Image (cartoon, rainbow, N blue to C red):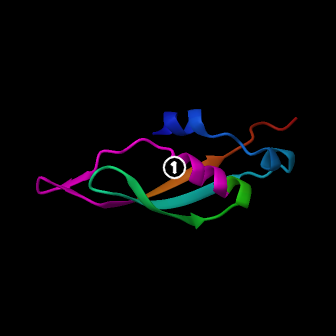
Amino acid sequence: MNEYLSNSIIYPEYAVDNNIEGKVILEFVIDIDGTITDIKIKHSVHESLDNEALRVVKSMPKWKPGILRGESVRVRFTLPINFHLGEKD
C-alpha cells in the first residue's frame, strides 16, 4: 500500500507553491467484495492536500476483505497520508 501511495500521489501545485505540508487522515470501509466505500476525512490539512488524498484512495485497487469465522466482513480502516516537501534550501 505504501508503494502504491508513493507512486500515485501527485503533490498539488498550490500546496508546493505555498509550502503546505501535513498529515491527512482518512477513514473508509473495505466492503465484503474488497471495494473501498464511505471515505471520510478525519483530519484535514488543506483542501488541496485533502482532495489529493481522497483522489488516491478512490483510485486504489480492491483490497482483500476482512475475514471473520471464515466469512468476508466489512472492515473500517484509518489511513494517515503524509505530505512532506522534503529539505528546504
Residue 61 vs residue 44, the one in the foreground: 61
Q: Does 36 sit above or below residue 84?
A: below
For the point 26% across and 55% down, the residue is 32
Q: Residue furthest left?
A: 69
- Percent across and percent down for residue 1 are 45, 39
Under mark 1, the amino acid is Val
- Percent across and percent down for residue 64 are 30, 45
Which residue, given by chain and number where applicable, does mark 1 sit on? 57
From the viewer's perspective, tell me whether residue 37 is left or right of residue 7: left
Over which residues does the magenta segment extend? Answer: 50-76
The image quarter in which residue 89 lies? top right
- Percent across and percent down for residue 13 are 80, 44
Query: Pointer 1: residues within 10 angstroms few (<14), some, or many (20+)?
Result: many
The image quarter in which residue 88 lies? top right
From the viewer's perspective, tell me whether residue 2 is left or right of residue 43: left
Is residue 66 rendered magenta in the image?
Answer: yes
Q: Does 63 sit above or below residue 45?
A: above
The image quarter in which residue 31 lies? bottom left
For the point 58% across and 37% down, the residue is 8
From the viewer's perspective, tell me whether residue 67 is left or right of residue 84: left
